[in-house]
Image (cartoon, helix red, strand yellow):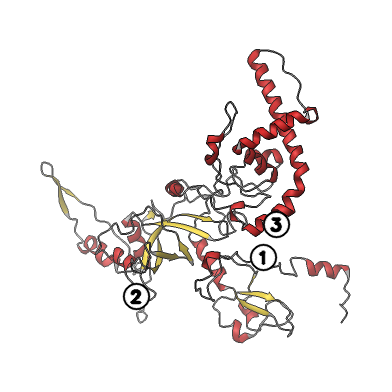
């Protein structure tokens, strides 16, 4: 059947973003070590691959989602929020293949409610404490670099996240050999020309340095064409013995993602050769991200803002967030650290944190070490968010810790009306209308103690009786 001929204007509109959907991005790479494990087929994938489409409630009643055919009401009206992803606009059966997109869209909304910025990851696990105390946003000018010149790319190679070459540590043997044959072996002549230019710059800088030291006129610049073949061969033999210099030349020529290899070859450094060492790239350990380090989850640059309570005013600490204990700690099952889920993500617990630092009989320790069959959904605890990063596979890594400040947790519970906090914490201060007197200093007598008026679920209008007329 011949294709229908359309005008240039219609073809332009069809290919525009207004009338067409973007092509789906590739799915996340699989974990080869989990090939023998059993996973749920309905589990949410690490990141979305298709565009999410929504429609007003007035249009959803008629099945109108902006396509050339309506979607079935029996499927689309069961969702609380209208969100679908279209996998195929026209199938062989002339139907639209779609699926609910509430998983990723609602997860995005939950994450944005946390008001937490995406931070630059640390190069070492031991630096997690510094990341929690001094988080650095991925939108800072030093690291948020997408377009660079060759000179600038070399000067900020310890900060940037975007590279032309692959991350060698994340490639399999087959991928590495294919990359060598296709992209590396064909650039041998270009690499030799690059080495000549680098050698000419080194010789020029050496001559200028010696001229300044001896107080003599500065000689002219050495050009790559002036280097003899004997000098170039000696230079090749020299850098082959100095692995640190050789790896830097190859990495900068191919613009490879950084690797943590410099410390390994410090013993093979040539004497009297100037070496420049800078801070390690934060993406050298786990590889650079496949998209922008923020992944579009949050555009905040700092968590340094004040939360305002309706009764108590500005708060010193951010309110902790309720999390679910997905899998408690158990030595019998081999789970040495409890698995915590919050806002649709599985959080990473700091390895140096004492999870059971409390008394083993405390409610928090019991919730982290035993399954809770009484409460619906299992045990739930409050945690403080330290930082959030995006790894090389597109997964969100959230670091959490214990609330630390007990009053922040009590204020959060009181605002939600949980656990009858006002009956246990604030009743004593509100029960007696008279001003209590407590001895502060026996010599000075009694000093009146101020009585604080605390809010409750009723004062917020959340605990009204349905049959009351108030």
Residue 143 % position (x, y)? 59, 45
Q: Residues within 10 Å of mark 1 (few under 14, many from 20)?
A: few
Determine the secondary structure under disc 3.
helix
Which of disc 2 and disc 1 is earlier in sequence?
Answer: 1
The residue positioned 65% from the left and 59% from the top of the image is 174
Determine the secondary structure under disc 2.
loop
Residue 157 % position (x, y)? 62, 42
Q: Is residue 268 above or below residue 462?
A: above
Q: Nearer the viewer, residue 311 or 278?
A: 278
Name the residue that disc number 2 marks: 375
Given this view, does label 1 or label 2 mark the residue nearer the observer?
A: 1
Q: Is residue 138 above or below residue 430?
A: above
Distance, label 1 to label 2, CA atoms, is 40 Å
Residue lying furthest left: 443
Q: Residues within 10 Å of mark 3 (few under 14, many from 20)?
A: few
Distance, label 3 to label 2, CA atoms, is 54 Å
Quadrant of the drawing holding the N terminus? bottom right
Residue 443 % position (x, y)? 10, 41
Which of disc 2 and disc 3 is earlier in sequence?
Answer: 3
Quadrant of the drawing holding the C terminus? bottom left
Name the residue that disc number 3 marks: 178
The residue positioned 54% from the left and 69% from the top of the image is 35
Q: Residue 29 sits in which quadrant? A: bottom right
Given this view, does label 3 or label 1 mark the residue nearer the observer?
A: 3
Name the residue that disc number 1 marks: 25
Q: Nearer the viewer, residue 158 or 301?
A: 158
């Amino acid at each position: 059947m011949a294709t229908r001929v359309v005008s240039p204007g219609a073809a332009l509109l069809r290919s525009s973003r207004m009338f067409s959907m973007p092509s789906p991005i590739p799915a996340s790479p699989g974990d080869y070590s989990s090939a023998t494990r059993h996973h749920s087929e309905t589990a949410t994938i690490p990141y979305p691959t298709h565009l999410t489409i929504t429609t007003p409630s007035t249009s959803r009643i008629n099945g109108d989602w902006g396509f050339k055919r309506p979607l079935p009401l029996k499927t689309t009206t069961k969702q609380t929020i209208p969100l679908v992803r279209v996998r195929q606009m026209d199938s062989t059966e002339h139907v639209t293949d779609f699926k609910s997109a509430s998983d990723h869209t609602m997860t995005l909304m939950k994450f944005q409610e946390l008001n937490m910025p995406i931070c630059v990851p640390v190069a070492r696990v031991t630096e997690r404490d510094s990341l929690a105390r001094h988080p650095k946003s991925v939108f800072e000018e030093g690291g948020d670099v997408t377009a660079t010149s060759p000179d600038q790319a070399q000067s900020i190679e310890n900060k940037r996240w975007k590279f032309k070459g692959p991350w060698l540590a994340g490639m399999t043997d087959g991928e590495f050999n294919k990359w060598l044959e296709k992209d590396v072996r064909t650039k041998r002549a270009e690499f030799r020309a690059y080495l000549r230019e680098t050698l000419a710059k080194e010789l020029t800088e050496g001559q200028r340095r010696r001229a300044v030291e001896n107080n003599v006129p500065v000689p002219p610049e050495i050009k790559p064409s002036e280097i003899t073949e004997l000098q170039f061969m000696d230079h090749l033999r020299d850098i082959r013995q100095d692995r640190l210099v050789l790896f830097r030349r190859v990495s900068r020529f191919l613009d490879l993602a950084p690797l943590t290899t410099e410390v390994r070859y410090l013993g093979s450094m040539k004497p009297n050769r100037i070496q420049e060492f800078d801070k390690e790239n934060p993406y050298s350990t786990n590889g650079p991200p496949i998209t922008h380090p923020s992944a579009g989850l949050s555009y905040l640059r700092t968590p340094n803002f004040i939360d305002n309570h309706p009764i108590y005013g500005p708060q010193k600490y951010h309110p902790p967030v309720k999390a679910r204990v997905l899998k408690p700690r158990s030595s019998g099952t081999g789970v040495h650290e409890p698995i915590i889920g919050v806002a649709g993500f599985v959080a990473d617990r700091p390895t140096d944190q004492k999870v059971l630092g409390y008394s083993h009989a405390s409610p928090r320790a019991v919730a982290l070490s035993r399954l809770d069959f009484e409460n619906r959904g299992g045990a739930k605890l409050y945690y403080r968010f330290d930082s959030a990063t995006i790894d090389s596979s597109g997964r969100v890594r959230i670091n959490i810790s214990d609330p630390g400040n007990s009053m922040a947790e009590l204020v959060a519970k009181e605002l939600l009306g949980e656990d009858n906090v006002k009956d246990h914490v604030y009743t004593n201060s509100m029960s007696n209308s008279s001003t209590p007197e407590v001895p502060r200093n026996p010599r000075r007598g009694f000093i009146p103690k101020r009585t604080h008026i605390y809010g409750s679920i009723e004062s917020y209008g959340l605990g009204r009786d349905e049959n009351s007329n108030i």
